[in-house]
Image (cartoon, grey):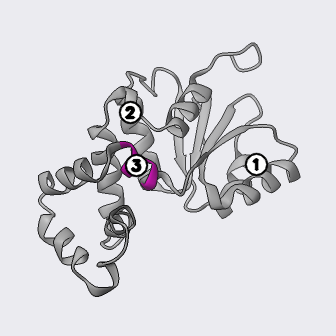
Amino acid sequence: MVPVARSVILVEGSSDRRAVEEVARLLGTDLATEEVEVVAMSGITNLSRHLRAVPDAIRVTGLYDSAEGRYVRATLDRLGRSDQFFACDRDLEDELIRALGVARVTAVIDAAGDRGSWQTLQHQPFHRDRAETDVLRRFMGTTSGRKLRYAGLLAAALAPDEVPAPLVAVLDEATRRSARHG
């Protein structure tokens, strides 16, 4: 699966992988030099399969949505693993939206040429009385490929000191050196 990696970061999907890779770049972490592979699992329910596929000599860490915490802990316990996984408050998109704030996220949407689509969604009756952060999260997932695209765009819009704590923690864990892992 990851023959040259020293560490593996397991994430739920490709948009999460894109955000982690962009934040690593933003923070000056060269994942290739650090021998860190970011693996999208196609859903948290594939955690067990991915954990079993990683050789013991490779450090494993990961991100998950807070609602999946019980599942992640149970899977780690069942496999006798003590790997450090980090929870995103709701999900990674929520972390990025909160870190940037609504105004900056909408500026990213404008710069990406999606203002019309954003305004159309905002004005739909179901979304009129909802919190803008909730509508932004919905916007990211309404069109195929949008979640992946905006994961990179939102992560790139962050300043290094604005990176959400779970992203900082997972990258720190993956690049940490110890006697056991090199």
Query: Residue 172 in the image: x percent, y percent?
Result: 56, 26
Q: Residues within 10 Å of mark 1 (few under 14, many from 20)?
A: few
Q: Residue at x 36, y 37 (%)?
A: 22
For marks 3 and 1, give the CA distance: 34 Å
Question: Is disc 3 in contact with disc 1, using a CB cutoff of under 8 Å?
Answer: no
Q: Which residue is mark 1?
A: 52
Indicate yes or no whether the magenta region holds residue 95. yes
Residue lying at 72% horizontally and 47% vertically, measured from the top left: 51
In the rendering, at what x and y percent does residue 153 appear?
A: 27, 47
Mark with earlier residue (2, 1): 1
How packed mark 2 is, by other alpha carbons closer than 10 Å (few <14, some 14-19, many 20 or more), is some
Farthest residue in the top direction? 179
In the picture, the quarter occupied by the N terminus is top right
Q: Which residue appears at 11% of the width and 59% of the height?
A: 113
Secondary element at tag 3: helix
Give the mark toward the camera: 2 or 1: 2
Residue sitting nearer the eye, 31 or 63: 63
Looking at numbered disc 3 in the image, what kind of residue is underneath it? Arg
Q: Position of residue 2 (x, y in %)?
A: 59, 38
What's the magenta bit mostly, secondary-structure-wise?
Answer: helix
CA distance separating discs 2 and 1: 34 Å
Determine crowd level at label 3: few under 14, some 14-19, many 20+ residues with C-alpha closer than 10 A: some
Q: Which residue is mark 3?
A: 98
Residues tagged 2 and 3 counted as in contact (Cβ below 8 A): no
The three-letter amino acid code for the residue at tag 1 is: Arg
Nearest to the observer: residue 44 or residue 114: 114
Q: Which residue is mark 2?
A: 162
Task: Estimate the spatial distance between the alpha carbons at disc 2 and disc 3, rounded to whole Å.
Answer: 10 Å
Residue 104 location in percent, x, y?
Answer: 23, 47
**Element assignment for label 1:** helix
